[in-house]
Amino acid sequence: MSRRFFGTDGMRGVAGEFPLDRRTVTALGLAAGEVLGRAGATALIAADTRESGPWLASSLAEGLVAAGMECHYAGILPTPAVAHLTLAHGYTLGAVISASHNPYEDNGIKFFGPSGFKLPDETETRIEEAMLRILGQEILAGGEASGLPALEAGYGEEYLIWLLSKWRGTRLDGWRIVLDCANGAAFRLAPALFSRLGAKVTAIACSPTGTNINENCGSLHLDNLAREVAASHAHLGLAFDGDADRCIAVGPDGKVLDGDYVLYHDALWRKAEGRLPGNWVVGTVMSNLWLEQALSRNRIRFYRAPVGDRYVLSCLQDRGAMLGGEPSGHVLFLDDVTTGDGLYTGMVFASHARRYGDASALSAGIEPFPQKMVNLRVTRRCDLAEERAIQAALQNEEATLGRDGRIVLRFSGTEPVLRLMVEAKTAGQVDEVLARLSAVLYQELGKA
């Protein structure tokens, strides 16, 4: 049985609708408890700032407790904080109620094992099977959940102290940094972190209401951050997403620095320090060609994984490597973290910018290939490799682009869309290829 509900980053949907209704989430908790439970099993639950977070956490806890697990609730915390704390405190299970960068109406559930890593595919499959069996038995009423466990105070501070212990190099005294916290899980911790590192912090999108998470802010909406960086003459701007597992930077020159930039500069630093095992860096099929070519010039090997942090992690582990990530700003530094950590990534951006003396140096001499991605809402999901007309169109466009361009076509693992990315020498080429391929895709798969 393949996974039906867990995507590349947990189980997501509209809060209140199947599979994120009270009854199904309680069944999910009961199933997770059955699969992972043992004598003395414990679980840590936290959420981002969505208004649906508390009742979803309560429903999940009800199921876990029914399965015999002792539950602890940490309130609002970033996803990577839960991963760290699950490992540090020896919890059997860590659970985060979040839909990351999605709008507030959506929510989701991510699980971490006692190692601090996300659960393997096969474990999620077993949990799904148990959940469906429980739902079929109709033993759950699906009424009001029985309440959250008592709030565990102090976990945010513990995570903050751990982050500070990982700072590299010179403090940020005298630096001005703007933080866009997406009205999400980092709204308290991110300003505190960079203030303690010595920076003068300007924080925006730090007033969560339960319905404004990711709304025209955060790592997917950088205009406000860029304006504030310019207005305050800041040395650096950092934007997180709703659960703070991503970070994107903006330099004082207004240039956006995505995950490719932090991979490049950290790879050079690690190679010089002897901390880049096998000289490997893992990106994804979405990583820009400039990164691959620049690493090659520095004799650093580069591998493209499928999109999704679990695939980046798998490719890193296969190579005994430490550094990998995605342009989205979800980056893995396996010598310190077990999952993407936006606050840690922000510290890495800041430490390299400080080392160079100016964050604009992070983009100096780098000319990314024009790249654009569109999300196509189609009526039919299918195995694209079996669609002859689509494959013929792709081969024709790839032949036209040659070695200085790429096309990536894939169904999203977290949203009901078909993602089409084109990269080429010029923006005009990108737009032309996108237009031709979009027409073929809508013709063959229907437009939703």
Image: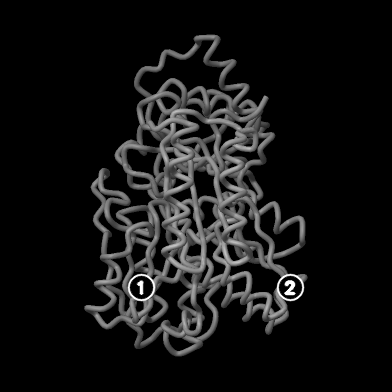
Q: Residue 237, which numbered label?
A: 1
Residue 5 in picture, x, y percent from top left = 54, 30
Residues tagged 2 and 1 counted as in contact (Cβ below 8 A): no
Determine whether 145 is above or below 208 in the image: above
Query: Relative to the observer, which residue lies in front, 72 or 294?
Result: 294
Residue 279 numbered mark, or none: 2
The N terminus, quarter of image: top right
Please determine whether, in this image, residue 17 is positioned above or below residue 81.
above
Q: Residues within 10 Å of mark 1 (few under 14, many from 20)?
A: many
Rendered location of residue 331, percent (x, y): 55, 62
Q: Secondary structure at mark 1?
A: strand
* Picture layout, residue 294 above or below residue 14: below
| Residue 73, x across and y down, in percent | 44, 42
In screen coordinates, is 61 left or right of 266? Answer: left
Q: Amino acid at mark 2?
A: Asn
Taking depth in this image into account, of 127 and 221 the one nearest to the observer is 221
Q: Percent from the top left, x then y, of residue 280? A: 72, 68
User: Relative to residue 97, is residue 132 drawn left or right?
Assistant: right
Q: Residue at x 68, y 67 (%)?
A: 302
Q: Quadrant of residue 235?
A: bottom left
First-in-chain label (2 vs 1):
1
